[in-house]
Image (cartoon, grey):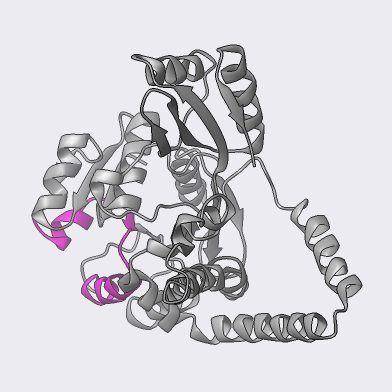
Amino acid sequence: MQAVSIIGCGLMGGSIGLALKSTRPTLFVRGWDAPGSLEMALQRGAIDQAAESLEDCVSGADVVILATPLSATMQIIEELKGILHPDTWLHDLCSVKVPVTERIRSVLQHDRFLGGHPMTGSEKAGIRFADGALYENATYVLCADERMPRDDSFEALLDILGATGARLLEMPGDVHDRIAAHVSHVPQLLSVLLVNLADRAKERDPDVLRLAAGGFRDMTRIAGSPFPMWEDILAANGKEVSAALTSFKDLLEELLLDLDAKAFPHIGERFHQAEQTRDFIPSDGKGFLKPLADVFVFTADRPGALVALTSALYEADLSIKDIELLRIRENRGGTFRLGFDSSGEAIQAISVLSEAGFTAYRL
């Protein structure tokens, strides 16, 4: 494959463009989006050329990637009718697969379609937050239509997608949507509800958010995700989300009964089961959700202290994914919260920082 067209040059589309231009520099990447996004995508090197229209974008492409929100993707599928070449591969990044596949079947009757869902992202949106490493080690689900040809061009498409650094995993679209409801869509809603719960508690306890740190921050990191995107997802996958929420409701009601009956052995069994099950969650790759591993560091109030802290981590090849100043006292110092990709990196960071003279610990 020599030419890839990306429709939607925001966070996901821009990131896939940056990844491909890094690993496949000879690949020609054309993009189509709003003028402002296209201009920034060109400036950042995510695309080689800005298309003037949808037809211009798909013309001559070996693969067309739909990196737009679900509602926009459904509309673009309608607009592709009559302008998409039969030999061009069509690929989408939507987080719900069955509705997209059904729309393509009914509108385009296009056999060369491979649905996709890279299990990575950010609570931030737009090309300015695009990152060429966003897909690295992420599980990238592929949902093939049974009519899809598995020829040499299909293998070439897999090679292009694999060049993002993601780990490709094929499964049926309906299975994907059911799993996504349990481990992505419901957790998003629960994250929002946890913040709503704390906000409601402020009426009685104004200091509630001052105590909300550590685990609460990790569990609610995605609560700030944009609702328009989630409105599309919940509308398209509402049946599966409702079924998963009903299961969660059953578990919550059982927990309430155990609390009222002071059946702590039963509650303890839930903790034990959760601990065992969680151990099976892969720790070496990104999933639907990936909270950061936090390290807390105290540093004295002196010039160059933060530079020394970050330099020690840089020399150890440890990347800080998030940093926050929690508190500072004049003439004494302050405490920073550093977020790392994994517990292993967090433990290594504590060792490196301790050797450099800092007080570092995990909760």
Figure check: 199 above or below 114:
below
Q: Where, quadrant-wise, is the C terminus in this rendering?
A: top right
Q: Report the residue that reaches farthest toward the front.
A: 331
At 82% from the left edge and 82% from the top edge, which residue is drawn? 258
Foreground of the two, 211 or 284? 211
| Image location of residue 211, percent across then percent down | 51, 56
At 63% from the left edge and 37% from the top edge, which residue is drawn? 362
At 30% from the left edge and 55% from the top edge, which residue is drawn? 125
Q: Is residue 128 magenta?
A: no
Foreground of the two, 108 or 354? 354
| Image location of residue 184, percent across then percent down | 54, 66
Q: Which residues are magenta?
A: 52-80
Residue 251 in view in this figure: yes
Q: Quadrant of the rendered structure where residue 27 is? A: top left
| Image location of residue 12, percent across then percent down | 35, 52
Figure check: 57 above or below 199:
above
Q: Quadrant of the rendered structure where residue 89 is? A: bottom left
Q: Where, quadrant-wise, is the N terminus in this rendering?
A: top left
Q: Report the residue that reaches farthest toward the right.
A: 265
| Image location of residue 310, percent across then percent down | 43, 20
Foreground of the two, 178 or 186? 186
Foreground of the two, 256 or 81? 256
Q: How many marks?
A: 0
Residue 104 in view in this figure: no
